[in-house]
Amino acid sequence: MQQKLRLWNDWLSSHMFLVVLFALFTGFFLQIPDSSVTRFLVILLFGYMTFITSLSISFKKFIEVLRHPWVPLWTLALIHFITPLVAWLAGILFYPNDFLIRIGYLICACIPVGVTSVIWTELSQGNTAVSLVTVTLDTLLVPLLLPLYFKLILGQSLQINYTAMVLELLAMITLPSLLGMAVHDWTKGKAVHFAKHIGGLTSKIGFFSVILISAGLVAPEVHWSSTLLKTLLVTLFIVIAGYSLGYLGSFATKDRSYATTIAMIYNVGLRNLSFGLVLALTYFPAAAALPITLGMLYQQPIAAIIPYLYKQSPLKKLPPNQANANL
């Protein structure tokens, strides 16, 4: 039975693009209503996925990255300084007379790193320790940077419930990560076998469910018309720019490897758009939420095809001990 579960898990891992597309289309068709129960379920599923992912990481590897945090810090610099600048300049270029759309693109670029970046890094055999450290540090950094962005652009501060945001991120990434690594060390690495069959399969079902719920929540905000074409194209450009920036930024790392590059691509490219959508709808007119909603159409499908694109890349995969040595 375990062998069958592992085969199913491996099949899903190699067909994540189809899994993501099916989840998106199903979610848009269902149009799931927003509620506190739905949001709690998403947090719970994220926490479980992060826990399963962390079963393959030891505290030693995590602390090793913390001792030499240059890659995570460089990744955070790309995320919170270069990406917002690119998004804001693109907004000025394509929407010089539409301030709310420009605000929407700024929100897309300056919100927290998407927790799914850790999941995709693991699925693509990237350096999960680097990704975990980046997301953990980002949890502490975002509450300081978000008010600064809006103060600079709008000339005023927003009253955002950062305490709730940090608690949610802790529940989705930090605590499950610590627990997963503790179980890894306690079982002397044997928990990895669980993560490769039952745990891996159920975490992918959870991943499918999260994408389905997210698509169902944003579906009512999308009103299809010919006027959306320009925004769709600009949003696609900005999403691709985020992933590309992570790839290009990896050239500045010492002893660049496949594992580190994949982690940087997903960390820089993926954002917590659900949080961004709530932020936009809470503090701005609905027009500001349009770029964020459309971004949800692109983020996960593009994330799913990145491993396939890498098969055409001249950067070859290294053995695990070498791939993860670039910290």
Image (tube, rainbow, N blue to C red):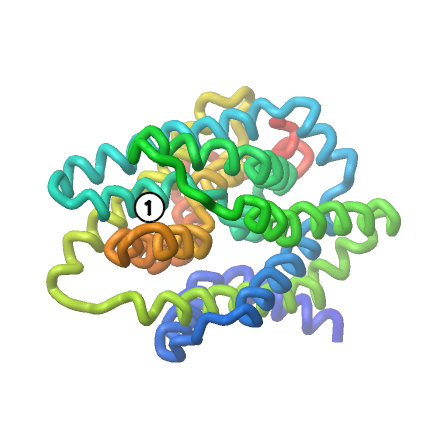
Q: Position of residue 186 (x, y in %)?
A: 88, 48
Q: Quadrant of the N terminus?
A: bottom right
Mark 1: few, some, or many residues within 10 Å (few <14, many ≥20)?
A: many
**Left or right for 167, reference 83:** right
Q: Position of residue 62 (x, y in %)?
A: 71, 35
- The residue that appears at 46% across and 53% down in the rendered structure is 275
Residue, far bottom:
30
**Where 154 falls versus 206 (above or below)?**
above
**Left or right for 241, reference 214:** left
Nearest the viewer among 87 and 236 is 87
User: To which residue does mark 1 refer?
Assistant: 239
Nearest the viewer among 280 and 185 is 280
Q: Is residue 250 visible?
A: yes
**Left or right for 321, reference 303:** right
- The residue that appears at 58% across and 22% down in the rendered structure is 70
Residue 126 picture quarter: top right
